[in-house]
Amino acid sequence: MDKSLFINWINKYFQGIVTRVLETINGKEGEAALTYLFREMLVKQYSVTGKWESLSSLNTRVSADYVAMDSSLPLKRRDSIKKATGDIVKSGMELWLNETQLSELDALIAQFGNDPNMRADIIARLFQDAPRVISGIYELLEKSFLEGLSTGVTVIDDSENTGTGIRMDYGYLSENKFAVAALWSNPAAKPLTDIRTTVLNKARADGNTITNVYMDDVTFDNFAKTEEVKNFYAFSVGFVGGAANIPPATVERMNAALRADNRYRFQIAIIDRKVINEKNGVRTTVTPWEEGKVIFTTSPQVGALAWTRLAEQNHPLPNVAYQTADDFILVSMFRENRPSLKEFTTSQARVVPVISNVDKIYQLDVKVVAA
């Protein structure tokens, strides 16, 4: 690795570019409009050991006892603790400027390098790959998180991943997984009854209160089209017309109705997210949330974003320009001749989404009928 041909520009602007990318990662313009649910639902947590852990403490709230003065206290049974753990794997990507692009950039700097009106154009061309390598790590984390939250397991195999396949099983409890009485794609299905008689009853018995429900857009559309849900919504808004004229229940209107009913008091969030994978130059679009899986939680916080330091952060190379994004992403710029001259921009990270407290997470599969 050799020092970049544009090291003076990198020394001056690299840090500011990375900072700007982080500021706009959840912005409102273009591709930056994509939001990342893992950033809202996971708390960033540094791992000294380089391992991730998902702890599930099956703590049942048990009443204390009244005891006579000077008598011993009654011993209660301590509930079990389950743990899933593994190494925090490395992720990363690289992009480069080829010889043609470098020649154009050289000419632009030679002719307009001192022109303040052209500076923004030069900077945009030189650092065009920095936003992509940073957001690439975020896209991978979002894919893994949504897949893990909906199924309890994140699997990235060799057919999708350039590198080693990985599997992270968060240990969802089998007793917290339910099926439905009838497929929600059937207008005669009773989704609210399914929810009350399975998830809410179990959560209540566990001493938990469901506050947040997550489902894909297709599942919500089926949910909203059932007769039971349409009648529930019509009653909640005081609609007195015929069944065929009931206004459509958007997620906002449905949430208002659910929050107003003491039997539910939760709110629904629609997961409609796609991620583009690329392997060997072939791009495929994937939907990480498994259709038909409805997840119920007691809090919008469901775990941690576990990260640890990279070896290269502790042993930086002398000819490489580095910046760190969001603590855990190491962004690098350097020059190599392999086989032709290229200017590389890379990102590396050791970070994984970890879903914990799985004893407070419930799953309803609306594409499976209970036996």
Image: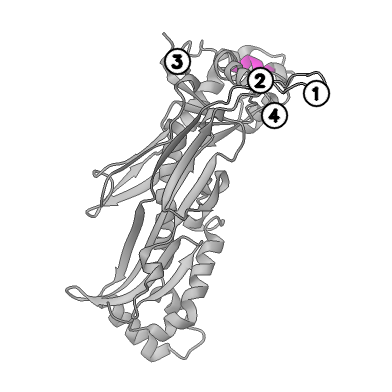
- For the residues carrying marks 3 and 1, which lies nearer the camera in this image? 1
Tell me: 88 left or right of 299: left
Tell me, yes or no, whether the two marked residues, 2 and 1, touch with CB atoms within 8 Å.
no
Name the chief secondary structure element in magenta.
helix
Q: Identify residue type, mark 1.
A: Asp
Vertical comparison of 303 with 89: above or below: above
Residue 241 on the magenta span: no
Q: Which span of residues is magenta-colored?
A: 229-234
Q: Identify residue type, mark 3.
A: Leu
Comparing 186 with 50, the one in front is 50
Q: Secondary structure at mark 4?
A: helix
Q: Which residue is mark 3?
A: 183
Other-residue count near label 4 (Cα within 10 Å), few / some / many at <14 / 14–19 / ≥20: some
Q: Secondary structure at mark 2?
A: helix
Q: Which residue is mark 4?
A: 256
3D distance between C-alphas at marks 1 and 4 = 53 Å
Q: Which residue is mark 2?
A: 233
